[in-house]
Image (cartoon, helix red, strand yellow):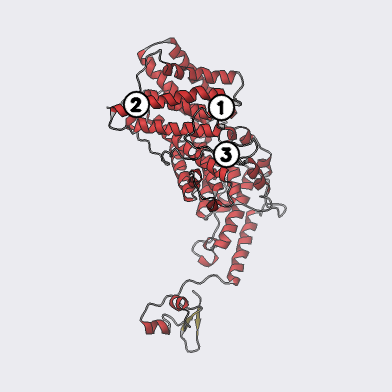
Amino acid sequence: MNLGREAGGKSRASHACVSCKENKRKCSKELPSCQLCIRAERKCRYAKRTPTVVEIRRLRRRLHSLEGATHEEQAEPELFAESADATGSVLPSVLVGSLGDAETDVFCYPQIRYSYVNTSVTNSIANLVGGFSSFSEDDSFFDTIHAWLPIISRKRYTQQLSALAMRPDAEMSLLALCVRLVTDVPRNAGSESMRTSLYVNAKCLASYIEAGGRLSIRTVQSLLLIGLYELGHGFEKSAYASISHTAAVARMLRVDKLCEENYNPAEFRGWDVEEARRVWWGIIIMDRLTVCSEIDIYRYANLQSCNANFAIHIPSSTYRLPKEKTSQDLSDNSKPALLSIESTVWVEPFAREAQVAYLLGRVLSHTCDPTSDPNFNFNEAVMLQAVLTTFKSLLPEEIDRCARYCGAIGICNRASALLLLCNSSPKADANDSTVAAVIDIASNYQTLLETGEIKNDELSPFVLYSLYQSATVLANWMQRSRDLSYIQSYRCILNMLEGFNARWKLAEHYIQLLQQPLQHDD
């Protein structure tokens, strides 16, 4: 609060007190209490004033000087440098401020803070990767991961990426960094080899942007890609925390409302509604798989020992599915189908993936949190098994480019194999069709790889979940029977996991788990 002093020595405030201002009365501005408040016998309170024009200019000059310090190694006063490599840290150039000095702390004033966060993050990421031109030249994300997790509009992404040189954007810069992150492939042995500086920088910058008060759908997309990276490379606990946090941020932005049948379009004016809807379904899919990861970590022999702790509850049947898209963009005028649509009706690959993720959630709830009624549990298991069998027979018929469906196939196989381990599921002998289907998973994936319909770099880590669960089922059956087909399929899965390790380190983690004895709960 700025204080003045009259000739008589009395201290005066620079502005009226709160009560006088609210009641539109002339305030004497005396300290510690004005005359009106004294007469009314009320507490006199002076609000913290807004910064003056002079102070704002001083803060802006400080901001410019900090920006200059960020670029002091540049030969020319350009926005982006081409010198840094991806092994360094962005933190020294970002975490700049004046501790304890409120008047010169740029983070205390929103109009300055947003500009500073935008500029500092954009410059730091550009320096880290050697300029954003390298992002625009790299289409590997849209050629691979986008096929089975299309949560980013390619058209909008390209337009906003090209505008970064003229208009810094912290959230868009972070998304570009996370796109680079998830396309990064292992170079060394060991799952910890993927806990790289690029990964740590992405996590730190995401937290930095959130602390700066910048939250948008781009932030949610970045957090989701970080969670995918963690899941794909075996950081299960980190992934669980990341996906839960991503769901919370998305819910705070009300992204979940876009999947409801009767959402209010006026509430999301200026949004790409379909892109945001796909993001929410991507979170649901990843959330289900993080629960699967918890089961995998502890290798429960009795699945009821594990709780299905979802960050997002099971959606209602009136939820809107992702709608059909073109190859280049997510935008069209078709009306989204409901989650309850018949499985025989054609929907696009990501919508089918959303449907089987919903079924996986139902299977996880059934196996981990059963009711007290054995008959109900048994009947529900029969129903779920029948629906999964329908989807498993339907998905291969829909394949036009296998990479687009590999995520849905992997999730569906995972749910089917998980249900087979459940105590309430119908008991099957070695010739049962469900057991045969689990055995066929290995040969089906092997055929796809041999024929070139799917490549390692196009592979969804969701496939690894189904391979691991199938191997677990086979290991259980091998304890009862030394059938040669079981042994051959089990070895085939191990060989494929070793091959897939070149893309996702989760495969190496699963190989290690399969070499450990199964836990048995008392």
State the CA–CA distance, disc 3 to disc 2: 44 Å
Residue under the image location 58 percent in, 62 percent down? 112
Image spot of residue 451 (x, y percent):
61, 18
Image spot of residue 420 (x, y percent):
39, 23
Up-down: is 215 above or below 342? below
Q: Nearer the viewer, residue 309 or 374?
A: 374
Task: Give the secondary structure at mark 1.
Answer: loop
Q: Any mark on residue 379, and which?
A: 2
Q: Label 2 sits on what residue type?
A: Asn
Instruction: Choose the circle earlier in sequence order: 3 or 2.
Output: 3
* Disc 1 crowd, CA 10 A, few/some/many (<14, 14-19, 20+): some
Q: Which residue is mark 3?
A: 181
Q: Label 3 sits on what residue type?
A: Leu
Q: Which residue is mark 1?
A: 502
Q: Nearer the viewer, residue 202 or 213?
A: 213
Left or right of residue 303: residue 183: right
